Amino acid sequence: MKEEIIIAGFGGQGVLSMGKILAYCAIMQDMEVTWMPSYGPEMRGGTANVCVIISDKKISSPIVTKYDTAIILNQQSLDKFENAVKPGGLLVYDPNGIINPPTRTDIQICRIDAINVAAQVGNSKVYNMAVMGAFLQMKPLIKPENIDKGLAKCIPARYADLISLNKAAIEEGMKAVEVIR
Amino acid sequence: MAEKILMKGNEAIAISAIRNGADGYFGYPITPQSEVMETLMKERPWLTTGMVVLQAESETSSINMVYGGACCGKKVMTSSSSPGISLMCEGLSYLAGAELPCVVVNCQRGGPGLGTIQPSQSDYNQCVKGGGHGDYNAIVLAPASAQDMYDFVDTGFDLAFKYRTPVIILADGIVGQMMEKVELRPEKPRMTEEELKAIAPWATTGKSADRSYNFITSLALESDVQERFNQKLAAKYEVIKENEVRYEEYQTADAEYVFVAFGCSARICEAVVDQLREEGIKAGLLRPVTLFPFPAKRLQELSGQVKSMMSIELNLGQMVDDVRLAVNGACPVGFYGRQGGNIYTPDEIVEAFKKFNNLK
Amino acid sequence: MNIEDIKKPENIVYKKTPILTDNVMHYCPGCSHGTVHKLVAEVIEEMGIQDKTIAISPVGCSVFAYNYLNVDWQQAAHGRAPALATATKRLNPDKYVFTYQGDGDLASIGTAEIIHACSRGENIVVIFINNGIYGMTGGQMAPTTLLGMKTATTPYGRDAKLNGFPLVLAPMIAQLDGTAFITRQSVHTAAAARKAKAAIRKAFEYSQKGIGLSFVEIVATCNSGWKMSPVAANKWMVENMFPKYPLGDIKDVLKQE
């Protein structure tokens, strides 16, 4: 099993931390991971992206140009990465701010209205976890107990109360994902 | 089982320094390695191990702080990225000239000049061939993973003290920025004063009654004195070449084609080897772990079994010169590289490989 | 009376401090360095801190200071001594750490290092020899060279338009919060040398109080570089250097008003 994922959106949407939590959840499942961010000036207000690779074997190249899954949170990232999804792969996107939705027909496409989910859960900061929930609904790579463990690793003990909030967002995200095609 | 933590290569450097008993870190912010000092400042090791961490006013000052700390026999280090390493080259020459141990991390970005902040391997010549003025080398370790970053801090200090020489960890923006699982090895405490005096009797620790005073200098105005010193360094480098060559091989046993690549490029080339093997082409990879000393002997041996070799580097072709020197014409040696922070994909390398070897 | 009678212990009225080695100094006759070395050595002896002292020599004539003082020495790259001292002191807080630097080393190529060591309040001592010229390289202009002064690189005299103005560093660093004691002294007379020694001792004492950097500037002569006899150089210094670099304490954070 090897899953190559690109997560892309605006800086501030929690792109990098979503990747980190996903990677930690995979580690809790005893898998190998790499997390390779774009870095530099674009971190400040522009687009941010991170490539996360999860595998049950040692990962050689951390750099890939075709992805099994693209998780897309703004138009620029959709324009950039829609064609980078492998045929038969998955594209999950948040429709807020998307003017030109994805058009490919050889991949599976899902929508997640994560802003709405975060609002329901009651905290805009867990937006990214709603998106992650949508992804994990479509590709259940991580067992629920390992998601809990991964969250516990990423959230400092003094914010333990946030773990349940994040979990709620993941669960609501799982429910809210819509398969377009 | 030891705890495995997800961390960036740069964070691994910082955590490893604390856990391996480093006495001091002196640095200056520069992308893509700023997380090293940021992590140290967040961890505040001066409250636990007593390690000193200081943000200097420049890379020039950082390396000279390292020089001062190294004179005292302390385990001291710095980190920077390419333009900062250029500023440190004066200090590196002095450290080599005064035979002082230290660890310097270069998380390379593209140049020349201010260049790009994206990953690169274009400081190979600078770091492997010396960098500063004068006849000297530093031991150069090339990490390819966050675990390597963690482990090489300790290895680096061991080698630095064993040979009284600066050790450079030649990383790059990918290895520095990428997060991976890192296994935290058992901790090593900082050296006690007694241990320090035993391992570094030459150090400036304050002249005690039982010894004459120590002075550390790289100055030798008399030609014969300087030449004797140069010869002494040369002899030391020969011992290092004999004993400290490190490399890793992947699928070389029956390989007809061998890639030579270090650091992040070696990771990418592993994928290339797999891809070619799936097509029935017997490819292999030699990854130099030490760039100085260079695994020349092993390359020479392999040159007898292969149809060709290819050096894959994120630069215009620097290590390829050393590969060619090693095989000395015994087989064709090709090169493929990208620059400016662009990273080759495995497909791209496969294509370049086939073109070089006239394969379809 | 023969020589052995004279050498009896009870006849000894002066003895060289053991902190000075027996090496013959390479300094020119009349140079101020020898006197300053002796004063620093005597302070180290009198304070009983030979085993706690780590000294850092510069690039310049005093690069070889490590041949003359019987303490542990580090020899720094040009201008970088305060960086070495910073690390040395932070890694060995109980030690007395001092740099010994000339005007080219400290006030030209090493301005960043000295200013930031001062600004950070490093608990070190800086001995700054200001003779307005580069001695070792053969008498070129220093940052502290006076206007009109002839040097190898200002053969017609220093011209402000061409060469800029003399850099007067001590009052600048006195304004930095990290400095504790800034003084300017000379060693051209016995009285001046006594005062300079007292200042050096105070600087060493302050460096253990955790109150910041102590800086002792010695306005000095370079009779070779100035192309004068030692006596004429002293006179020239008093008449020309002192008006630009007046002697006295510039800052002392512990002084009761």
Image (tube, coloured by chain):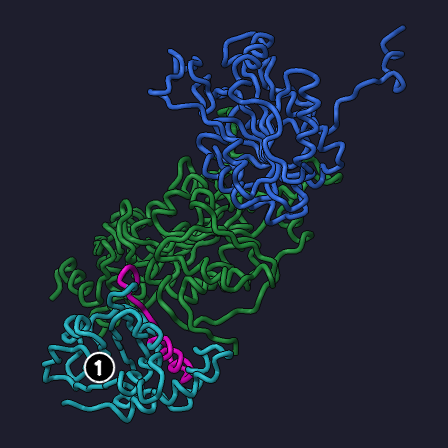
Chain colours: A cyan, B green, C blue
Q: Is residue A13 left or right of residue A83?
A: right
Asked if residue C102 lies left or right of residue B335, the reply is right
Give the camera-side residue of B297 and C114: C114
Question: Toward which corner of the image does residue C27 lie, by quadrant?
Answer: top right
Taking the image as shown, residue B290 lies to the left or right of residue C96, namely left
Please name the residue shown 26% across and 62% down the image.
A42
Q: Can residue A27 be found in the magenta stretch?
A: yes
Question: Residue sitting at 72 percent across and 28 percent down?
Answer: C42
Return the x and y of residue B50 as percentages of the image width and height.
Answer: 61, 58
**Among all residues in the image, which is located at the extreme front?**
C257
Q: Position of residue A113 (x, y in %)?
A: 23, 85
The residue at 51%/60% (across/down) is: B17
Q: Nearer the viewer, residue B250 or B139?
A: B139
- Disc 1 crowd, CA 10 A, few/some/many (<14, 14-19, 20+): many
Residue bounds of the magenta highlight: A19-42
Report which quarter residue C186 is drawn in.
Answer: top right
Residue type, label 1: Asp
From what the image shows, is residue C256 above or below residue B287?
above
Instruction: Say which residue label 1 marks.
Output: A94
- Would residue B157 be counted in the magenta stretch? no
Q: Where is residue B339 shown, x and y percent of the image?
A: 22, 54
Quarter that holds the C terminus of chain B: bottom left
Q: Residue furthest bottom?
A: A175
Q: Determine the chain carrying the residue at label 1.
A: A
Locate residue B256, reporting x and y percent: 24, 64
Residue C209 visible at all: yes
Q: Is residue B99 visible?
A: no
